[in-house]
Image (tube, rainbow, N blue to C red):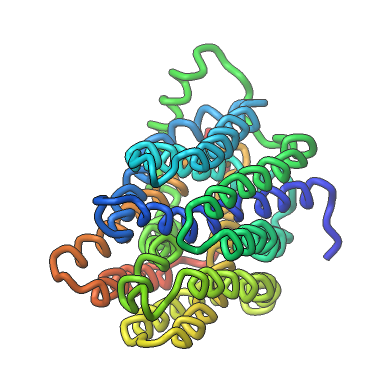
Amino acid sequence: MKLTKEEKSWILYDCGNSAYSMAVATALLPIVFGMFDNVGTSMDLGYFNSLASIVIAVLSPILGTIADYKDKKKRFFMFFAFLGILSTLSLAFISPDSGQWQLLIVFYVLSAIGFSGANIFYDSFLVDVTKDDRMDKVSSRGFAYGYISSVIPFGISLVLIFFLGMDKAIGYQLGFIITALWWGLLTIPMIRDVQQRYYVQPEPRPIMNSFKRLGSTIKHIRSYRTVVIFLIAYFLYIDGVDTIIKMVVPYATSVLGADALDTFSLLGILLVIQIIAFPCAILYGNLAKKYSTRALITVGIVTYIISCIAAFFISSVWHIFILGAMIGSAQGGIQALSRSYYARIIPKENSNEFFGFYNIFGKFAAIIGPLLMSLTTTLTGNARVSIFSIIPLFIVGLLVFLALPKEKKIKTLS
């Protein structure tokens, strides 16, 4: 499929911010956090992940509604993207020797808010850069190229960490800098080439009127049965997806122990997951055209359920490689197709408003999973059983998703 200039620039941002998701949220930050004295375990990061998700969940529908006005979407996107990039860069200057783990967490939460906030507007730009019949493939390529390109900054960081010392913070700090620079560089094409094509015309008192439109949508959202059912299902199953992305390092380390799973092996496994996710995300996009988007999302959810069950039984490093391959095969596909499926069933002129709801459901879901895993570990004293706490979310999410009516577009809000 030949991509347009706008589609390519949109995809490049996925390549940029995927480096953050991979290097910072999943790999480097949990390890650096563990280098501080008297801060608990890396499983406690679940509480801080939940805090960042709460902030975005509260802001998402409000910001999304305001950004539906002409020329507002890109401004909001740029603000949050730069917040995320600068906060990620700031992580590099907090050394474990300083003992200032609270400051590290502040910058991490800000970086997570910037990352997630920018994605509200980035996701909604999908309706502006491509047509309905191309959304599955364009969205899938965004995730696919994001996964494979994130290998570059993460791989460079991994080499530096290896040569500078696995137990020294300097390599990880340089990894934060590399990630921020990579993210910033690949944000430029998005800012330069992508324009808001669908919008609500400006009007007096935009903030007040935005709240009125938001209230009207909430009041009448029951009219949009397909959207409501999908959001409930998405709320449940994406919780598990986001939780596994954020908690895979703390979980594997806690279950196998630092002696069985050294840091370099763990980071190498994450690298393999990214490489496997690349062709599988593209494959999901291609198969969705033949077998339907709903069928492929179902396959992704089932794959995650099996992966969670398998995770309970891991006992050696090679088990992690197999588990990582299973997760990588579904991770990009389920995220990409969920985004494109939703983009097709919402009114384009109100895309930010509806993606605000998409993100509030996604972010509130992201609060539950890490919190459940952390609480289960705290209450039972056994990190291994914590993986069972998120399986019901996948199962119920699948059942609700299967209840969706036949896919169809809805009318623009009046």
Residue 114 left/right relative to 109: right
Residue 193 x/y as whole percent: 79, 38
Q: Nearer the viewer, residue 51 or 285?
A: 51
Answer whether residue 140 is visible to the viewer in this image.
no
Identity of the residue furthest to the left in this view: 379
Answer whether residue 122 is visible to the viewer in this image.
yes
In the picture, residue 124 is in which quadrant?
A: top right
Identity of the residue furthest to the top in this view: 204
Residue at image location 61% in from the left, 37% down from the top: 349
Say if 184 sits above or below 161 in the image.
above
Residue at image location 69% in from the left, 71% down from the top: 282
Residue 300 left/right relative to 403: right
In the picture, residue 247 is in which quadrant?
A: bottom left
Residue 3 x/y as whole percent: 83, 57
Residue at image location 50% in from the left, 78% down from the top: 324
| Quadrant, the N terminus | bottom right
Residue 409 left/right relative to 245: right
In the picture, residue 400 is in which quadrant?
A: bottom left
Residue 37 x/y as whole percent: 29, 51
**How many marks overall?**
0
Residue at image location 53% in from the left, 50% down from the top: 170
Residue 90 x/y as whole percent: 51, 37
Residue 275 left/right relative to 206: right
Say if 126 sits above or below 370 in the image.
above
